[in-house]
Image (cartoon, helix red, strand yellow):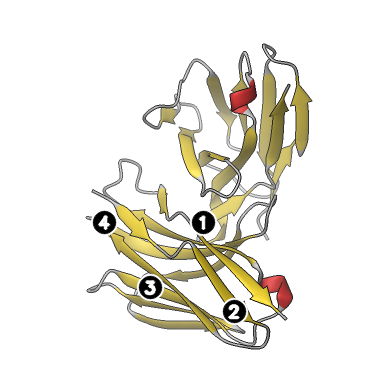
Amino acid sequence: GQNIDQPTEMTATEGAIVQINCTYQTSGFNGLFWYQQHAGEAPTFLSYNVLDGLEEKGRFSSFLSRSKGYSYLLLKELQMKDSASYLCAVRDRNAGNNRKLIWGLGTSLAVNP
Amino acid sequence: GAVVSQHPSWVICKSGTSVKIECRSLDFQATTMFWYRQFPKQSLMLMATSNEGSKATYEQGVEKDKFLINHASLTLSTLTVTSAHPEDSSFYICSAHGGGAQGYTFGSGTRLTVV
């Protein structure tokens, strides 16, 4: 089957670094996505990983290990506006529709001053 | 960049009436449209996947006769919530495949409140 796990809630301090982990189980892994979602808004794309390693994009980085079924999103120099829900999603080529994304439940990050 | 226009942004309707939500891809052809529902403080729940010109594929537990999906063209997909009830109150979001970040472009969402 398919399963994605990520922590429900995290708290961090402004200016600090936070790492949000995501583990997944799929039969036909075909890419992992991270999205940011503020309350009442649609998700915003942050990163995409399909090969092992680290993808860096400004303050945000995402890491993938396919052999471990593991990814993390790293947020540096946290700002108050980074308080949001962070969603991990995996594309599985065996999911009936190979474009369908399997979503984690999201990690609610609270950044405190 | 790729844009999906979703309307309305919010709607309040009476119980028993129907509501139509539109998602239109403005500068690309959306061969596949995903329709999600999201309850407060929960993740996205995929309701159905529609491909242009064919019937939508509904996820388990989603009533196809209640949530009517039409994807008649490569730029327009609609979701109609029929005979709406208060429990249908939710945030509905479309996501088009084609263009956008690694191929997925989200609409801005529709907040439906059934009273």
Q: Earlier in the sequence, mark 2 or mark 3?
A: 2
Q: Which mark is residue A12?
A: 2
Residue under label 1: B103
Name the secondary structure under disc 1: loop
Disc 1 marks a residue whose amino acid type is Gly
Marks 3 and 1: which is nearer the front?
3
Q: Nearer the viewer, residue B106 or B1?
A: B106
Disc 2 marks a residue whose amino acid type is Ala
Q: Position of residue B10 (x, y in %)?
A: 76, 36
Q: Which mark is residue A26?
A: 4
Residue B8 visible, this orientation? no
Q: Residues within 10 Å of mark 2 (few under 14, many from 20)?
A: some
Residue under label 3: A71
Marks 4 and 2: which is nearer the front?
2
Q: In which image quadrant can residue B1 be found?
A: bottom right
Q: Earlier in the sequence, mark 3 or mark 4?
A: 4
Q: Residue at x 75, y 21 (%)?
A: B13
Dot 3 and dot 1 within a common chain? no
Marks 4 and 1: which is nearer the front?
4
Dot 2 and dot 3 within a common chain? yes
Q: Position of residue A99 (x, y in %)?
A: 40, 49
Q: Nearer the viewer, residue B14 or B2?
A: B14
Disc 3 marks a residue whose amino acid type is Ser
Q: Position of residue B55 (x, y in %)?
A: 44, 24
Q: Nearer the viewer, residue A18 or A2?
A: A18
Q: Position of residue B73 (x, y in %)?
A: 59, 31
Marks 2 and 3: which is nearer the front?
2
